[in-house]
Structures are given as C-alpha cells and as structure tokens.
Image (cartoon, rainbow, N blue to C red):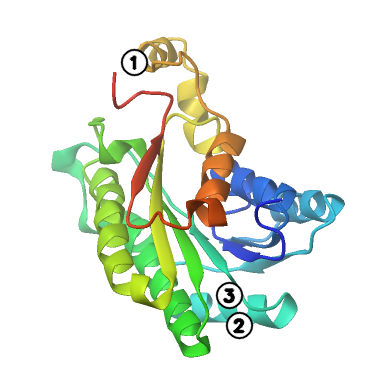
Amino acid sequence: MRLKGKIAVITGAGQGIGRGVAEIFAEEGADVVVSDLKLDSRTDEVVSTITKLGRRAIAVQADVSKRADLDRLFDTASEKLGPVNILVNNAGIETIVPFTELTDQQWEDVTNVNLKGEWMAAQIFCKRLIAEGRPGCIINIGSIQAGKVLPGRTHYAPSKLAIEALTRNASAEMGAHGIRINCIHPGLIETPMTDWVLKSPDILPQVIAQISLGRPGKPFEVGRAAAFLASDDAGYITGQAIYVDGGWVGK
C-alpha cells in the first residue's frame, strides 16, 4: 500500500472523480477527509466505503471559494484524523455559455471555485506544512480543456489551464520545503458532470472517435494516477501536468 499511514484531504469528494480518488487512496492505505459543498447521502456513502476498506474517514462540508471554510476544513481534519500529508484539489464546477453571452457573475462563479479555490486551499495547506516543518504533496485537478478547445467554455477552460501555471509556479517555491505539487488533467471520465455527453447518441460517438483508447475513462483511473503522484514512487516529480485522457489531446 503506497499511501499507508498518510492522511489526505480531497475536495469535491462526494461523487465523480473526487470519489474515485478517495476510494483508491483508501485502498492504498490512506485515511481520507471527504470534503464537499454539501454533506448528504453521497458523502455518507463515500465515508462508508472507505471505512469498509479498513481506513478512517470523515466528511467535512466546505465551500472552497471561502477561506474560512478551508481553514475550518484543515482544522477539522487535523483534530479528527491527525496531520494532513496530502491535498487533492478536485472541487470544480462547469457551465457552458457562448462567449458573447457570458456574464461577469458566470465568470466569477466558475473561476472562484476552479482557480481561486485551488490556490487558497494549496496556500493554506502549504503554510501549515511549513509552520510544522513537515513535507507534503498537492495534486491539483485540471481538465482536458487545458489542452482541448470546446465551445462555450471561455470561462471554464482558462480556469483549468491556469491551474497548470499555478502548479508550476507554486511547486518552484515550495520544493525547498519538501512540498511537491503536480496537476492531473482528466479527459472524458464517467461522472455526473459528463453524464449529458455519455447519454447523447449524437455527441458521444464524435468524442469517442477522438480518443485513442476508444472509450471514456473511469474515476478510479484518475485515482490511480493521483495515488502514484502522492506516493514516494513519485518523489522526484513536481511541477508537472499529466493528461489522463485516453490519448484525446494527442490524437
């Protein structure tokens, strides 16, 4: 188990990619803080699944666009489980709006969660690690849209591409403190966010035709990549962005 003895905070872990990462981390030996905007039956189910794997888990509500919520998230994690070693910045939202119709509020809603939220969570976590003199690891979740143009995402795509720059720059400063920071750009993954694509007889074949492996990915496949980057096996990897997309960007 590559993450045995580690404690991970995963945002947006109530479903989709976040849940996939949480469950793989538990399989790899980590205790997990399941964070989401709302705590409900979904987060309860994730916590239950993790505990059945023999690991500790708690659910903590947090709006990642609010610094006070993030401070409380890390406080609760430390109090309930112990010092956090890993942060997975997964929480994100997406809307599809034509460029000329995009409003200030729609821009702010998306960037406040997808970019500002990842920056604040990473900053809070790094400050705590430095103050405690501990190493750590951050995995920022981006999107295929960092490298693939899709209509109606002129607010979403920049927020995700910016995460790659955030990863590179923060990793350059944090390396001296033993903190590694990397980024994963998922492709078409079977999640509630992509359900409308997966169920479309018109859109899905067009997308699949562009994917070298000829299929959507599963949340656990992103989880496995995240587990590798969080483990000692990736001890000399930092500031990098990897596409887990079945070869969509490269085709």
- Residue 250 is labelled as none
Judged left or right of residue 248, residue 100 is: left
Pointer 2 local density, CA inside 10 Å: few below 14, some 14–19, many at least 20: some
Mark 1: few/some/many CA within 10 Å (<14, 14-19, 20+) = some
Pick the quarter of the image with the C terminus.
Answer: top left
Rendered view: 88 above or below 200: below
Give coordinates of residue 183: x percent, y percent. 39, 51
Q: Which mark is residue 73?
A: 3
Residue in the picture at 82% in, 50% down: 53
Q: Given the image, on which type of amino acid does mark 2 rest?
A: Asp
Q: Which residue is mark 2?
A: 75
Is residue 139 at all visible to an observer of this figure? yes
Residue drawn at x 61%, y 64% as measured from the top left? 8
Given the image, on which type of amino acid does mark 3 rest?
Answer: Leu
Q: Position of residue 99 (x, y in %)?
A: 17, 40
User: Which quarter of the figure has residue 33?
Assistant: bottom right
Name the spot of residue 215 as percent of width and height, x first: 49, 17
Q: Nearer the viewer, residue 215 or 167?
A: 167
